[in-house]
Each structure stands twice: as C-alpha cells, then as structure tokens.
Amino acid sequence: MAVFVPAWDEERVIGAMLAAALDRYDHPDYRIYVGCYPNDPGTIAAVGAVAARDARVRPVIGARSGPTTKADCLNGLWRALCGDDADAGRMTAAVVLHDAEDVVHPAELRVFDDHLRDAALVQLPVVPLIDPRRRLVSGHYADEFAESHRRDLVVRSALGAALPLAGVGCAIRRDVLERLAAENGVPFESNSLTEDYEMGLRVAGLGLPARFVRWRQRGELIATRAYFPDTIDTAVRQKARWVTGIALAGWDRTGWGTARHVADHWMRMRDRRGLLAVLALLAAYAALLGWGVSALVHLSSGTASPEHGAGLRALLMLNAGLLCWRLATRARHTAAEHGWREGLWSLPRALVANYIAMLAARRALFRYVAILFGAAPRWDKTAHRFPDSLPGAG
C-alpha cells in the first residue's frame, strides 16, 4: 500500500507524525509518500531526516512553489507512485490518504486490506482530539464528527448513497484511481478545495461500491485521531474552505448523481445545505434578539406584551421540542465517543458551532466570488499540532 501525506508548511509536525506511523503500523508492505514544495525547506528537511533513517518514507518535491491545492500535491504523489511502480515492475494495491497531523491506528492498513477486496474505497472513522484548554472550539469538531461518523456515514453506507471521504483514514483501490485518472490524466481534481469529498462522489458516479467501516480491536475503535483548529479564526478558515468546496464550487463537477437514487439526492442536499442553514440561524438569532428587546421595552414601560395566538404557541413548542431532541442526540453521540463530560460540554458548544458556521459562510461567499472572477484556488491551511502522548493503540 502507498500512504499519501500532502505537506505544506508542516515542519512542526511532519517528523513526529511519520515517526509515529512507522512505529505503529502493523503491516508488512507499505510506503509513505510525502508531498513537499520547493519553497518549503523546513518541511523538506524534516521529511528528509526521517527518510534517511527509514526507506519506507518517500519524499516527493513538486515542481511548483506552494501553496497550490492539496489535490495538486496529491497528484504529484500519484505521478511519483506510478513512476516507482513502473521502475520496480510492481503494482501498488491501494492508496491511503492522511494529513501531516494525523495519529494513525496500527490496524488500519489491515482493515483496508480486508475490505478493499470487494469495495472500491473504504473510510474509517475520524475522532478529533479535544484540547481541555480550548474545549469550546476544538471540542465542537468532536461533536460534529461523533454525529457524522457514528450515524450519518453509517446510514449513507447502508443506503448505498455516495460516500464522501474525510480526506484522512481512507483508502482507494489503485485500479479505481486509474479509472478516475483516465478522465483528465490525474485522479484528483487539481482545482478542487475539497478533493476528498468529491472523490467519494466521483467513485459513486462510476457505479462502484464504497464502505464506511466502524471496527474495534480489543475494545478500541480503529480510527484516525488528530487535533483540529482550536481558535475561532482558524476554525472559520477551515470551515470556509469546506463550505466553498462542497456547497458552492464543487457542484459543476459532482452534480446530483443518479436520477432515480432518492437517498443519494437527499444526502447530497444535506451536504450542500450549509448556506441555507446559516440563513435560518441568522433569522432565528435575530428573532430571539428581537423578542428579548421587545420584552425589555414592555417591562420598562409597564405595558403588557401582546398575546400570542394558539397556532404560534404550538409552533414555538414544537420547535423547542425539536431543538431539545437535536441537542440530546448530539450529546449522546459525543458522550458515546468521548465520555459523559464532553457530552454535557456539547450543549454550550452548539452555540460556538453556530457562530463559527455563520462566519465561515460569509468568508466562503467572498472566496467563491473571487474564484468566479478568476482567482486561483489555493491551500488556505491552518497551523497543526501533534500530540505529545499518542492516543489509542500502540
């Protein structure tokens, strides 16, 4: 197997990530391809230091200065893999995707081996690590991924709907990548901001099966673990890229899938609802603020607030009940993955998540307009960190 790790400005984490992966992977035959840029000497040096000790690490320095897009970097790794296979007279079975800050699970490559026999691609769960010092921002990723990877992707996989990749902890068969590359010479869409998401939909367009696998080894979930952005600014930047790629810029390439596949249409609509959801959030918070101001004015002036009709009261009660159900579901999934304390923390984090979503939508719109006027998509990455003590098996 080949593990692809695109790396731009990752000198702080890439060495530790590679050393941990080499130490943890329980598999007899793999090689880690790390994509670097010629104008990023720090990352090149960090990768080179590990490669000098272990031949399973293969640095690949691209021809273009960075940052480009992550997809462009992955295409450089693909070309290097094809060249290496041709020179060695062999054929790599599959490509695994990871980021420079990921903590890999020792058993993941064996899981991929098992399931890629009859699936075109496989996605494992992603479990964000929570920084107790910045629990509100870093933890809201844990809440969202707990719901997505304990419920949503399980349902999508069961329904046979297109399975979007998370970009980490996933594997695609070599022959599938070759079929995708036949379209324009490379398997990843170089101008895409969310090449992982689109990859899953493009594979579904070929009529090939995808699988989301939740499996435990000695009670521990086989998953990729990593720290996500832990400040408002970095979270907004990351999520703006997701919104731009999924809800705006990617439609022309991914479309709506098979006309008769109702479940797939529904899931893609849910993926792309981000901007509409933000409009609903803005309206809801504006209404809440207006209600509060109105109540204060009536209280200060000694006048009675107007009575609400029975229909409006029933609607408000229904919405309140749905909100409580939604928060309870979120807390339950977070608690199952991270413990009951984090489940309780997910309640105030819902407000933080909404705030980040609104700021990200605004940034995504500006970014998309810039792309429409000719701006090149680029890798708007955030600074990463690698844990001092490794979670999970190992």
Image: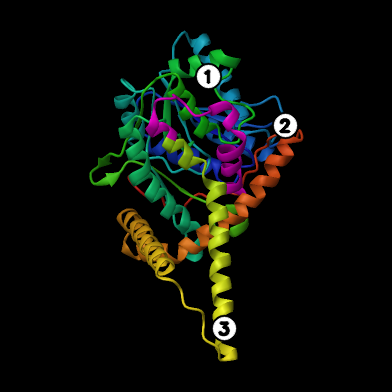
Q: Position of residue 73 (x, y in %)?
A: 61, 29
Amino acid type at circle 3 is Leu
The residue under the point 32% across, 41% down is 222
Q: Position of residue 255 (x, y in %)?
A: 53, 28
Height in image: 184 above or below 220?
above
Residue highlighted by disc 3: 296
Q: Is residue 166 above or below residue 317?
A: above
Query: Residue 50 or 172: which is nearer the viewer?
Result: 172
Q: Nearer the viewer, residue 22 or 98?
A: 98
Real-space CA distance between mark 3 and mark 2, rounded to the nearest whole angstrom: 58 Å
Q: Residues within 10 Å of mark 3 (few under 14, many from 20)?
A: few
Query: Is residue 170 at least partly visible in the picture?
Result: yes
- Front disc: 3 or 2: 3
Instruction: Name the secondary structure under disc 3.
Output: helix
For the stretch drawn in magenta, the main secondary structure is helix
Residue ID for mark 1: 81
Does the magenta run of residues contain 243? yes
- Which residue is located at x 28 percent, y 39 percent? 215
Q: Which residue is mark 2?
A: 65
- For the record, the magenta segment spans 237-265
